[in-house]
Amino acid sequence: MTKLIAVVGASGSGKSSVVARLTAGREGRISVVHADSYYRDLSHLTFEERDRVNYDHPDAIEFERLCKDLRSLKAGQRIEAPVYDFSVHNRAAETQGIDATDVVIVEGILVLADPITVELIDKIVFIETSLATCLKRRIERDRTERGRSERSVRDFWETRAAPMFLQYVAPWRDRADLVLSGERDLSAAHEQLSAWLLADTSQ
């Protein structure tokens, strides 16, 4: 039976890096669903209007489709997940096939912001990283990958990312089944997560 493991934390906490290391070489055994892929289709808006959307708020995620796909995975069915293009703030035309492996990682900031989605999750992993470190990583990433200025990244962080994290994500730290540090060497977090998953799935 497919087990859904949520991996959550702040933007820049190291979630994606830890999950990428975990799944490398384990195709067919561990699949990954990225919650960011389920940002709503905003084709009806102009780019300028889409750029003003608060993507750190739960309303930005199409949880209806995410829940439908997670139920299908738990039932052993392959899904076609949406693909999101961050350069234009909208969904791409193609989809991504995801298999119902024994373990499916559901990774994203807002995975647990929807109560119906929470009911489908079997275990919760929280990546704990200081907000100062997260902001530094986000500035570096958005400069190189999304062409944003440091000023714009700081504005997004202070008005959207940090407040939304504190409201919707941080409270799950004390309810997590596993808390990992994403502060420095992420290889340690990867090793801990890998050992924990191995022990959990063998039970």
Image: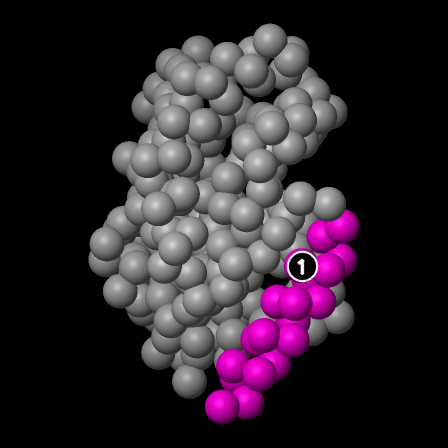
In the displayed image of the protein, which residue is found farthest to the left? 116
Q: Quadrant of the N terminus?
A: bottom left
Residue sticking out furthest to the top:
151
Relative to 11, residue 159 above or below: above
Q: Residue at left 75%, top 58%?
A: 187
Give residue 106's position: percent from left, percent from top. Answer: 47, 59
Characterize the magenta stretch by its predominant secondary structure: helix
In the rendered structure, the answer to whether residue 178 lies left or right of residue 12 reads left
Q: Where is residue 165 in the image (x, y as percent from the top left)?
A: 41, 35
Q: What stretch is highlighted in magenta?
A: 185-203
Residue at screen point 61% across, 81% down: 198
The answer to which image quadrant residue 6 occupies is bottom left
Which residue occupies 36% across, 66% down?
Answer: 121
The chosen color scheme is one colour
Q: Position of residue 115 (x, y in %)?
A: 23, 54
List the residue tagged with mark 1: 189
Is any part of residue 77 visible from this angle? no
* Disc 1 packing (10 Å; few <14; some 14–19; many ≥20): many
> Judging from the image, what secondary structure is the residue with disc 1 in?
helix
Q: Can residue 179 be seen in this view?
A: yes
- What count of labels does the image hold? 1
Foreground pick, 162 / 63: 162
The one nearer the camera, 143 or 139, is 139
Q: Does the magenta stretch include residue 198?
A: yes
In the picture, measured across the screen, residue 138 lies left or right of residue 77, that is right
Residue 170 magenta: no
Q: Nearer the viewer, residue 23 or 126?
A: 126
Q: Which amino acid does label 1 sit on?
A: Ala
Residue found farthest to the bottom: 203
Position above or below: 109 against 65: above
Measured as percent of width and height from the top left, residue 23 is found at 67, 65
